[in-house]
Every structure is written in structure tokens, then in C-alpha cells.
Image: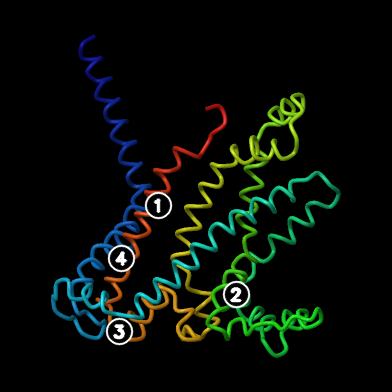
């Protein structure tokens, strides 16, 4: 009996080992990819940020010299200003307009699927095509926007050709493509139980009260997700301004964003060590903002059933 029990235990242990081995083998491609394409570049970039590495030459270890030079780089601070300006205005506006559109598209009226499709379509258009389209629409000479403003007696600005209006123009273009966020808000609205609204109607609550005491509070988990993703995306803004300005950030560097300047240093001027230092500063800033948002979420994010 004891021998049979020992044989049974050995067999179970052998099966467990085989299952663990199979699990590691299935996970191996992902683990190898993580190490090679994420962890290794991360570690190497930390080292490069303390060197004068330039792709063409191995460079030398220079300590914090790259970071010191950044503190004296005027274009570095200009790119920070442009990026923060964009994030401060775009992220709140995208949340407000996204929630408002989702509430409108959540109405039970005929043909709503068509309207939802129309608002989602801009997200399927490549950023390069969006840039070309809006460069034509906002052209100060023959653009449709200024043409419409002229019809109502308003002299339109130079838009992308104006240092004052270039960033607002970019914000407006970016808001045109928030269809993906609207879909997420729609999913969040569909998850809110009708029982809350029925109870509110019994109590005689108005549309305003139902919106700000039921809909918005119960939609805060979705708003929280889009806030985090919006902040990260805003600080990584690159394709649209780069395409609009052919990588020059004109006029007067008003559209030179942080990631654009990082790209220029790394792949135009081959100052890879300098660019690595910029990348790590961006990483720390985004991480701190994300932690701050997560910390604050305990105060304003409400989950159903809690």
C-alpha cells in the first residue's frame, strides 16, 4: 500500500512538473520578446543617457552632462511649453466633448447606428491624411473655414501660419478624431443600470439631476481610463504636428513638441545620448502624472455597487 501511495505521489508530481514546463514553454515567446524589445532597450537607454553616444560613434561616459545641457537648451523648454499647453487644453476638452457626444449618441432614436458610425470614421483615417485635409481646410487664402467666416463677415486668422493660432488649430484637429473615446464612453453608458434612472424618475428628478447625480458619477471609471490614456497620448504627441510642419515645428517653433524634438536629436542630429536623456525625463514626468491621477481617483471615481 505504501509503495502504491509513493508511486501515486511521484506520478502527481511528474504531472505537475510537466504542466509547469508546458506553461513556461507557451509563455517563452512572450517573455523573450519582453526581454529583448522592452527590458533590454530600457536598460541600454539609461546607460546611453549618461554618454555621448551618437549611433555613428560609441561615445564616452559623460555622467550628467546631457541633463545639464538640457537645462540650458531654450528649444527644450519651448517644446515642454508646447506639449503642456496642448495637454492642458486637449485632455479636458476631449473628455467633455467625448462624454457629451456619447450621451447624444446614446439616445434611442431612429438611425442612431449611422450617426455613431459617422463620428467613429475619423479615427480610421491615418494622421498623415488628416494633416493634409486640415491644411487645406485651414488655409488662410482659400480654405473652407476662412471662406465660411468671410461669408458671415469675420476675417479668419492665419491658423497654422500664426504662432498664436497654431496650437489651438492642432487641438481642434485632434478633437475631430475622438471617436474611439466616444465608443468607450458609450460602452460605459450601456453598463449603467436603468434601475437608477427609474428610481430617480419616481423621486421626480430632472434631466440635470439624473445627469450629474447618476450618469457622470457612474461613468467616472471610464472617464478615469480615458484621462490616463489622454494624458499619456498628449505628452507623446508627434505624428500630426510633425506632418503639418514637415518636421520643422514652424511657425517660430510653436508646433515643436517634446517628442518631435527628441526625435530630431536622436535621428536627425544623431545625438542619441542627448535624446535618451530627454526620453527618461519624459518617462519620469508621465509616470508622476499617472501616479498622481491614480492617487486622486480614490476621491472622484465611483464604481457601481460600492
Residue 197 percent across, percent down from the top left: 72, 31
| C-alpha distance separating marks 2 and 3 | 31 Å
Q: Spot the residue most to the right.
A: 110
| C-alpha distance separating marks 1 and 3 | 30 Å
| Nearest to the observer: residue 267 or residue 145 | 145
Look at discs 2 and 4 and give the one toward the viewer.
Answer: 2
Q: As displayed, is residue 90 above or below residue 153?
A: above
Q: As displayed, is residue 221 above or below residue 111?
A: above
Which numbered dot is residue 270?
Answer: 3
First in sequence: mark 2 or mark 3? 2
243 left or right, relative to 289: right
| C-alpha distance separating marks 2 and 4 | 27 Å
The residue drawn where x is 74% and y is 27% is 198
Q: Mark 2 sits on what residue?
A: 169
| C-alpha distance separating marks 1 and 4 | 14 Å
User: Dot 4: what SS?
Assistant: helix
Q: Mark 4 sits on what residue?
A: 281
| Nearest to the observer: residue 24 or residue 52 | 52
First in sequence: mark 1 or mark 3? 3
Q: Mark 1 sits on what residue?
A: 290
Few, some or many residues within 10 Å of mark 3 (<14, 14–19, 20+) = some
User: Dot 1: what SS?
Assistant: helix
Amino acid at each position: 500500500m505504501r509503495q502504491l501511495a509513493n508511486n501515486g505521489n511521484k506520478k502527481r508530481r511528474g504531472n505537475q512538473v510537466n504542466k509547469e514546463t508546458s506553461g513556461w514553454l507557451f509563455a517563452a515567446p512572450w517573455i523573450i520578446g519582453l526581454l529583448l524589445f522592452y527590458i533590454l532597450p530600457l536598460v541600454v537607454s539609461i546607460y546611453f543617457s549618461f554618454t555621448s553616444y551618437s549611433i555613428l560613434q560609441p561615445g564616452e561616459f559623460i555622467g550628467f552632462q546631457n541633463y545639464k545641457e538640457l537645462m540650458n537648451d531654450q528649444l527644450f523648454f519651448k517644446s515642454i511649453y508646447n506639449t503642456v499647453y496642448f495637454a492642458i487644453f486637449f485632455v479636458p476638452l476631449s473628455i467633455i466633448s467625448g462624454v457629451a457626444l456619447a450621451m447624444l449618441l446614446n439616445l434611442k432614436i431612429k438611425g442612431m447606428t449611422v450617426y455613431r458610425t459617422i463620428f467613429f470614421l475619423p479615427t480610421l483615417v491615418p494622421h498623415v491624411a488628416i494633416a493634409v485635409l486640415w491644411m487645406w481646410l485651414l488655409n488662410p487664402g482659400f480654405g473652407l473655414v476662412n471662406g465660411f467666416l468671410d461669408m458671415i463677415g469675420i476675417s479668419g486668422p492665419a491658423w497654422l501660419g500664426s504662432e498664436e493660432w497654431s496650437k489651438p488649430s492642432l487641438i481642434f484637429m485632434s478633437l475631430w478624431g475622438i471617436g474611439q473615446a466616444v465608443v468607450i464612453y458609450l460602452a460605459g453608458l450601456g453598463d449603467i443600470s436603468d434601475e437608477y434612472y427609474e428610481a430617480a424618475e419616481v423621486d421626480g428628478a430632472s434631466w440635470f439631476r439624473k445627469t450629474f447625480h447618476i450618469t457622470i458619477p457612474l461613468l467616472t471609471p471610464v472617464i478615469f481610463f480615458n484621462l490616463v490614456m489622454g494624458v499619456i497620448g498628449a505628452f507623446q504627441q508627434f505624428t500630426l504636428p510633425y506632418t503639418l510642419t514637415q518636421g520643422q515645428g514652424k511657425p517660430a517653433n510653436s508646433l515643436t513638441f517634446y517628442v518631435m524634438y527628441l526625435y530630431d536629436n536622436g535621428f536627425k542630429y544623431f545625438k542619441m545620448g542627448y535624446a535618451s536623456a530627454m526620453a527618461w525625463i519624459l518617462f519620469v514626468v508621465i509616470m508622476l502624472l499617472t501616479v498622481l491621477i491614480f492617487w486622486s481617483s480614490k476621491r472622484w471615481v465611483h464604481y457601481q455597487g460600492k
